[in-house]
Image (cartoon, grey):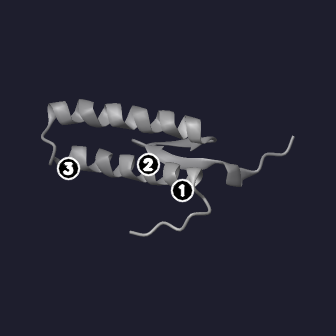
Amino acid sequence: MDIQVRQFLFYNDGGNTVAVITAETLHHAIERKRDELYKVASQYSWTSPEVIHISQELDKLITRHVLLKHPDEQLTS
């Protein structure tokens, strides 16, 4: 069986590289990262380097999810 690597999305989950195959599994990864963000934010302030780092990771996951769901749309910043 051949596997096309381009179908996978990869992200770093606090030191571990995780392969994400579908928008649904990417959605679950976003939910896990959001839970992690709230957990860490309850221990530190929302402006702490730890929380900001996790928030940036969450932003990347959300961006990947949007691009996966809307690959043909041109997104502007």
Seen as rendered, the residue at the extreme front is: 73
Q: Quadrant of residue 36?
A: top left
Label 1 environment density (alpha carbons within 10 Å; few <14, some 14–19, many ≥20): some
Estimate the x, y position of residue 13 in percent, counting from the top left.
Answer: 43, 41
Residue underneath mark 1? 67
Q: CA distance from mark 2 to mark 3?
A: 20 Å
Estimate the x, y position of residue 54 in percent, counting from the top left.
Answer: 31, 45
Q: Quadrant of residue 35?
A: top left
Q: Are marks 2 and 3 in contact (CB under 8 Å)?
A: no
Local SS, label 2: helix
Who comes first in sequence, dot 1 or dot 3?
A: 3
Residue underneath mark 3? 49
Seen as rendered, the residue at the extreme left is: 45
User: Is 12 on the left-hand or right-hand side of 72?
Assistant: left
User: Is 2 on the left-hand or right-hand side of 75?
Assistant: right
- Residue type, numbered disc 1: Leu
- Residue type, numbered disc 2: Ile
- Residue type, numbered disc 3: Pro
